[in-house]
Amino acid sequence: MTVEALTEYGFEAICMPDPDREITGVYIGDLLSWVMGRAKSGDAWLTIMSNINIVAVASLADTSCIILAEGVTLESDVIKTAEAKDINVFSFSGSCYDAAVLLSGLL
Amino acid sequence: MSEELKFHFIVDGDDFTSAGKASVQVKKNLRQLGLSPETIRRVSIAMYEGEINMVIHAGGGVADVTVTEDYIEILLSDKGPGIKDIDQAMQEGFSTASDNIRSLGFGAGMGLPNMKRYTDYMDIKSTVGVGTDITMRVNI
Ligand SMILES: Nc1ncnc2c1ncn2[C@@H]1O[C@H](COP(=O)(O)OP(=O)(O)O)[C@@H](O)[C@H]1O
Ligand SMILES: [Mg+2]
């Protein structure tokens, strides 16, 4: 499915500069080196981390989007950076587990 | 590509919010050169881990990237405290990072292992009290 389709399932777009990007898998984690070491290109990255460094990590690991679970949001300067770096970011009110279960039925 | 291409970066030691700038720029440059996405991903992640290490552990440093016909080479050089036991530092999970750094999601002790994992060649030369030089190569 594309990143844009997430909005139909309770994922709220914080910024979506690349809506046509295909989601090919899921990775869950908050430790940035684990994400860079284990996430695959195209994965949706589920996390509760919201500091500016997640943008660079998502860009370098080439994930299809960041999904912030537990209703976590971003500060406006982080949103601006994500937008500029072409990184899709969503907020989800449930847990990482809830989001993963939902995505598992969609992918 | 008959000639070597070189990029030089100064990695600022006290700016956490812009850490990773050099790696993100290298990713851009390699994209323009038309290298494969997988090669770009390996190079830029390995370089990012090294760049972050220079910021967290060494107060900054310099990065030099060379692109040849056969490989991409990354040289990272700092005048930080050095690494006492390289074998120990290479182990997954070993980290001397502070709680403050960990709260940002760094300090998992996976940086050096990731650098090794994503490159075809890696060499660490480090002297306590003098600094650390790391060479990495990714074959094209
Ligand atoms: N450039 C460096 N200068 C000094 N020490 C370093 C440097 N890079 C790595 N280290 C040491 O090696 C350890 C392991 O590095 P790494 O695997 O990247 O894990 P982390 O950065 O998460 O601590 C660090 O905690 C630190 O003690
Ligand atoms: Mg590290």
Image (spheres, coloured by chain):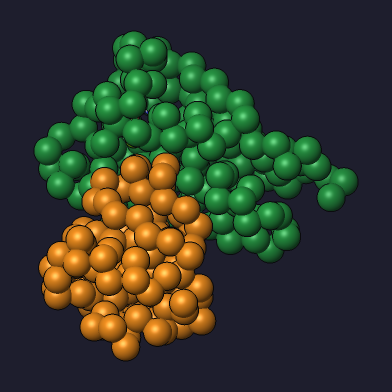
At x 50%, y 73%, the residue is A22
**Vertical placement of residue A4 versus A71, above or below:** below
Q: Is residue B82 visible?
A: no
Give how far across and how far down residue B48 sits, in percent. Answer: 44, 45
Vertical comparison of B126 with B59: above or below: above
Q: Nearer the viewer, residue B44 or A5?
A: A5
> Which quadrant of the frame does ligand 2 lie within?
top left
Name above or below for residue B88 compared with residue B58.
Answer: above
Residue A79 pos. (x, y %): 29, 75
In the image, residue B116 above or below residue A69: above
Identify the residue at image location x=56%, y=25%: B122
| Residue occupying the point 18% across, 41% down | B102
**Residue beneath the point at 48% across and 46% down:** B45
What color was chain B assigned in the picture?
Answer: green
In the current view of this chain or complex, which residue is farthest to the bottom? A8
Q: According to the rendering, which colour does chain A have?
A: orange
Tell me where residue A44 sits by quadrant. bottom left
